[in-house]
Amino acid sequence: GFEDGEDWKGPLRLGKKKVDYLHFYFHNMFDAKNPTPLIVAEANITQSSPTLFGMVRVMDQPLTEGPILTSKMIGKAQGIFASVSQT
């Protein structure tokens, strides 16, 4: 092993190519009792901007196996997104 000084470096041996297809549904719930994207900051011009320029949101959205929100939840999409286009 690494601890006893064994030379662990060597050529990378690639296995057979395999393709997987992931299918999941992202639920963006703006009008829910507990909306999943929340506005945390905005610029003075955000509300008059057609692109909501300057708006920053945080999100914690469910990912499900099917298109219906009551489908089995398989994960969450979490992060920050911002509206950055002025046109």
Image: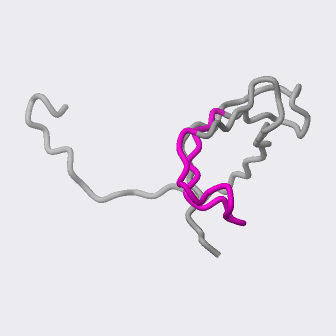
Magenta run includes residue 57: yes
Magenta run includes residue 44: yes
Q: Residue at x 29, y 59 (%)?
A: 11
The foreground one among 19 and 61 is 61
Q: Residue furthest bottom?
A: 87
Give the image quarter of residue 33.
top right
Q: In this image, 8 relative to 83: left or right?
A: left
The image shows residue 69, relative to residue 81, as above or below, that is above
Q: Residue at x 19, y 31 (%)?
A: 1
The foreground one among 83 and 60 is 83
Q: Residue at x 78, y 46 (%)?
A: 23
The image shows residue 74, relative to residue 52, as above or below, that is above
Q: Residue at x 62, y 37 (%)?
A: 59
The foreground one among 32 and 28 is 32
Region in magenta: 40-60
The foreground one among 35 and 49 is 49
Q: How is the image coloured?
A: one colour
Name the quadrant of the C terminus.
bottom right
Q: In this image, 62 relative to 53: left or right?
A: right
Q: In this image, 18 relative to 8: left or right?
A: right
Spot occupied by residue 55 in the image (x, y as percentages of width and height): 58, 52
The image shows residue 45, relative to residue 69, as above or below, that is below
Spot occupied by residue 29 in the image (x, y as percentages of width and height): 79, 37
